[in-house]
Image (tube, grey):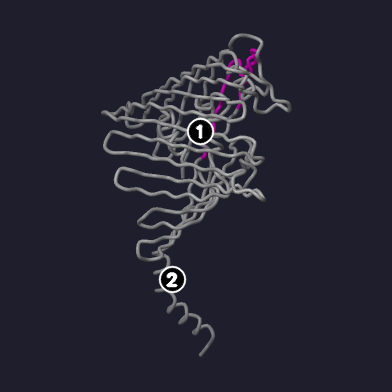
Amino acid sequence: MHKTARRWLLAGALLPAAGSIHAQSSVNLYGVISTAVRYTNNIDGQHRNQTELVSSGIGGSRWGLRGEENLGGGNKAVFLLENGFGTDNGKTAYNALFGRQAYVGLATAWGSLTFGRQYNALNNVGWSFNPLDQSWGNFWSDPLYLGGDIFFQDYRINNSAVYKGTLGPVTVQLDYGFGEQAGSTSKGRTLGAGLMYQKGPLGLGVSYDQRRTADGANTIRNWSAGGSYAFGKSTLYLGHMGRREDAGAARFGIYFAGLGHQLTPALHLSAAYYRYQQSGAVATQFQPLPQVLGGGSADAVAAVADYALSKRTSLFLEIDAVRARSGAMGRETEYWGGSPVMSSSGTTRLGVMLGMRQTF
């Protein structure tokens, strides 16, 4: 038989099988592209203002590949690879190609078990009740960053195993991060868990995470609790997050409350108030020689208007104001301005941001 004829016959024989395989497997490309122009008054506590193009104005800019393969009997192999990038300069975020997420695992009727770099339960529960985070993701200067962005235990866990399962209105997540330090199973290790309840208009959630530093000298504990209640076109949110560091007995806490309202099919409005406190031997985070700051507090208010131009494209306007006092002033000015300022009893920072976001 002629070679070309044999090839066509072989291709025809394989087509049904190829179609069957394709029907049981899928790989999807998705992403978010978000950027904004932001003006900040007194960003560093020394009365310097800043105008900038910020990447990921609302919702971190990313692209990813999500896939699954049907193994039969209700079981699936799953994977996810997600890259973060800056829309202001095009650079890859987190110094890694897939720095946002990278995992593979199995999903069954009893839940999923995945391995790799993954979000911890603290992140998934904590953001769920932030009044300004609903449906789009946190924004660039979100008040939950008060104190230097310390309430989420690094958001993601490297070298981790994560279990997720849902039974009726309850979803549970368990995290374990291998410390991978020679001679010790506890140094560098992370442990975490979260519980979410959602039924009708009511949502509740709690989570906990602890991490031992690589040298074993400090254990950091973070936790969160929150709730939401929907009525009509509005949703009320309440939440608390805390952190304790064994070294120096440093303690941090933030309480928040807010409201989201779907004013029109295209326009969503949200506003919130945040109260932050710190105590104990709180020190700077990024200085070559840590400087002890001590206790302090801060108050923040913020509001977001999100207008949908289509199902995939929206414009957003955000405004915020933060008043920090005593040691909290040092944490805020170091985080946003690069160096801690303690020359006065307090500082006020104001900001406004206008941007665009598209999903695919």
Residue 49: in magenta span: yes
Residue 325 at x, y percent in the picture: 56, 13
In the depicted structure, whether residue 194 falls above or below residue 337? below
Question: In this image, 259 relative to 126: left or right?
Answer: left
Which residue lies at the image location 63% right of the left edge and 15% below the top edge? 45
In the depicted structure, whether residue 248 falls above or below residue 107? above
Along the viewing direction, whichever of 291 and 330 lies nearer the viewer:
291
Number of marks drawn: 2
Instruction: Give the SS element for disc 2.
Output: helix
Dot 1 and dot 2 residues touching (CB under 8 Å): no
Q: Which residue is mark 2?
A: 18
Extreme-right residue of the structure: 288
Extreme-top residue of the structure: 344
Residue 58 at x, y percent in the picture: 49, 32
In the depicted structure, whether residue 160 falls above or below residue 356? below
Instruction: Measure the C-alpha gap from mark 1 to mark 2.
Output: 49 Å
**Which numbered disc flags the more N-terminal residue, 1 or 2?**
2
| Quarter of the rendering containing residue 132 | top left
Numbered range of the magenta stretch: 33-52
| Image mark for residue 222 | 1
